[in-house]
Structure formats: structure tokens, C-alpha cells
């Protein structure tokens, strides 16, 4: 059982940089991704690794917590976790290669880079064969530095031939929103991939350098999980369509 809760660079004037600076500060403080140096197992206490000793199990504690929050359990099966960038990087190509009808990808950050060029090539080949590919990313993508702290990588808008892949930008960061700074803090940190409404992969890995860099480079330590299950997939497809339609003039119909 899985407990699951569905939830082009532009020229900008100087005033927009104030909002952008605030946003970048917020991004660094809010993302759940961790760096290798942040993990210190020696700092963990024994009590942090076991449920509170009051008779119930940890699973029961979580079940009660989610029930109070109105989050329903969903049946799932074929659970396959991936704990390293190499594992998911290899599997991602196979995962996308199984698509026959459509691919939905929602990712907080997406940048084209040699570490994910095979994934992008697979998406392009699938689209050329008639598979409908939809990619949604957060505007924060445009403000992600590479390790040299000087350069940026291209966003997905520049990764595919024009019109081949459907792309939507979540809550674009624009100077016109300077007088509504609160709206700029609405960012979509989710990372999930859906193939044909039958397979779901989700977790902490973005589709960018930091999430897919080889071990030993400046990579994040995240995990991805692949599963199947109609009860899980249906609400996630609904969530993707709803978010897409809120952020793109090109509507996606759930029934399609």
C-alpha cells in the first residue's frame, strides 16, 4: 500500500531582479533535495530511527496521521526503488522507451546536459514516432547555476525541434508580477513521470545535472520510485492535466 497525495528566457527590466533575488533565496531554503555533504549519519540518534514506544507501529502512526489530514491510501504494486543517479539514469531510458501513447513529465528543474542527453534523445525519438510528449517545468529552471557558479544550462524549450514536444512553464517568473511577490513563491517542486497512464515514476530527482550527475561529481542524493497501480495513476494523470491547463494555452483533456 502506498500513501500518496496528488498535489524561453525573457528580457527583464531592472525591477524584476529584485523579485528574482527574493525568489532564488526562497528556492535555496525550500527544496527538499540534499547534497552529499549534508548527510551525517553519525548525527542521528537511535530514537530517530524507531517509532515512538507507545505500543503502535510506525506504519500505524503514519496511517493515522494521513487519515487526519484527509490523505487516502492508494493500492500500488510492482514497487521498484532507485537510489543512485546511475540506476535511474539507465532505467529512465527504458521507462520512456515503453511508451506507446503518451508521456507526461512534471519536474521542478529541467536542463539539457550531457548527463541526460540520452533521456532527451529518447523523448525526441518517441515524439517523432507519434507518442504525445508533455513536459512541464518550474520557472526556477532558468535560474539554476552550474557548479562553476557562472553558467546556466539550456532549458527544455531549446532541447527539441520546434513543435515536436509539448512544453509548459509553471507560474512564469515575470517582471509584471513584481507587485504580487507572493505569487512568485508559488513553485512546483514535484517530480513525476507517467507513461501511458500505466506506469508512474516519482521521487526527488529533477531532470537536470545535479540530479543525474555521476557519483563523485557534485550530485544530489535523492531517490526515485517506479510503480504501477490504477488507483495511484488516475489521480496523478488528473493532477498533471489540471496543472497543465492552468499554465498553458494548449489544453490537455483527461479523457484523451
Image (cartoon, rainbow, N blue to C red):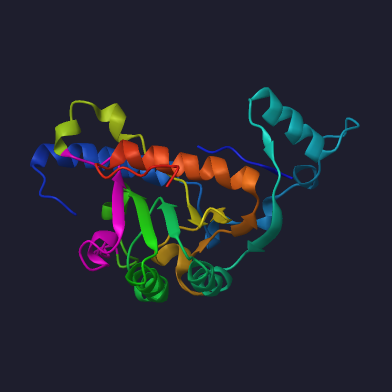
- Residue drawn at the location 52% of the way across and 44% of the way down: 236
Magenta stretch: includes residue 166: yes
Q: Nearer the viewer, residue 161 or 82?
A: 161
- Residue drawn at the location 36% of the way across and 72% of the way down: 129
On screen, residue 14 above or below 160: above
| Quarter of the figure with residue 201 | bottom right
Left or right of 68 on screen, residue 85: left
Magenta stretch: includes residue 147: no
* Count of numbered badges drawn on the protein: 0
Which residue is outermost to the front? 255
Magenta: main secondary structure equals loop
Left or right of 149 on screen, residue 237: right
On screen, residue 193 above or below 256: below
Task: Point out residue 156 in the picture as x, y percentages from the top left corner.
Answer: 29, 61
Task: Point out residue 36 in the picture as x, y percentages from the top left corner.
Answer: 54, 62
Left or right of 56 on screen, residue 132: left
Task: Point out residue 237 in the picture as x, y percentages from the top left corner.
Answer: 49, 45
Q: Nearer the viewer, residue 1 or 43?
A: 1
Q: Nearer the viewer, residue 2 or 43?
A: 2
Specify the segment rendered in magenta.
149-174
Task: Point out residue 64 in the picture as x, y percentages from the top left corner.
Answer: 75, 28
On screen, residue 221 above or below 235: below
- Residue drawn at the location 14% of the way across and 33% of the way down: 176
Q: Nearer the viewer, residue 235 or 28?
A: 235
Q: Quadrant of the N terminus?
A: top right
| Quarter of the figure with residue 114 | bottom left
Which residue is outermost to the right? 55
Amino acid at each position: 500500500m502506498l500513501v500518496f497525495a496528488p498535489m524561453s528566457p525573457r528580457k527583464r527590466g531592472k525591477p524584476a531582479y529584485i523579485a528574482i533575488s527574493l525568489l532564488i533565496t526562497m528556492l535555496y531554503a525550500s527544496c527538499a533535495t540534499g547534497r552529499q555533504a549534508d548527510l551525517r549519519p553519525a548525527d542521528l540518534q537511535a530514537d530517530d530511527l524507531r517509532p515512538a514506544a507507545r505500543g503502535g507501529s510506525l506504519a500505524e502512526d503514519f496511517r493515522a496521521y494521513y487519515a487526519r489530514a484527509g490523505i487516502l491510501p492508494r493500492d500500488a504494486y510492482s514497487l521498484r526503488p532507485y537510489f543512485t543517479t546511475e540506476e535511474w539514469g539507465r532505467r529512465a531510458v527504458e521507462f520512456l522507451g515503453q511508451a506507446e501513447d503518451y508521456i507526461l513529465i512534471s519536474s521542478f528543474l529541467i536542463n539539457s546536459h550531457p548527463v541526460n542527453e540520452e533521456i532527451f534523445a529518447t523523448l525526441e525519438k518517441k515524439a517523432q514516432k507519434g507518442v504525445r510528449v508533455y513536459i512541464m517545468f518550474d520557472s526556477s529552471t532558468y535560474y539554476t547555476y552550474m557548479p562553476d557558479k557562472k553558467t546556466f544550462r539550456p532549458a527544455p524549450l531549446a532541447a527539441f525541434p520546434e513543435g515536436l514536444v509539448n512544453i509548459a512553464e509553471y507560474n512564469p517568473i515575470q517582471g509584471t508580477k513584481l507587485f504580487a511577490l507572493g505569487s512568485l513563491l508559488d513553485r512546483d517542486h514535484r517530480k513525476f513521470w507517467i507513461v501511458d497512464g500505466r506506469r508512474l515514476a516519482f521521487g526527488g530527482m529533477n531532470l537536470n545535472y545535479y540530479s543525474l550527475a555521476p557519483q563523485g561529481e557534485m550530485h544530489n542524493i535523492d531517490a526515485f520510485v517506479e510503480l504501477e497501480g490504477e488507483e495511484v495513476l488516475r489521480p496523478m494523470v488528473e493532477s498533471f492535466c489540471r496543472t497543465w491547463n492552468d499554465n498553458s494555452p494548449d489544453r490537455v483533456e483527461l479523457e484523451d
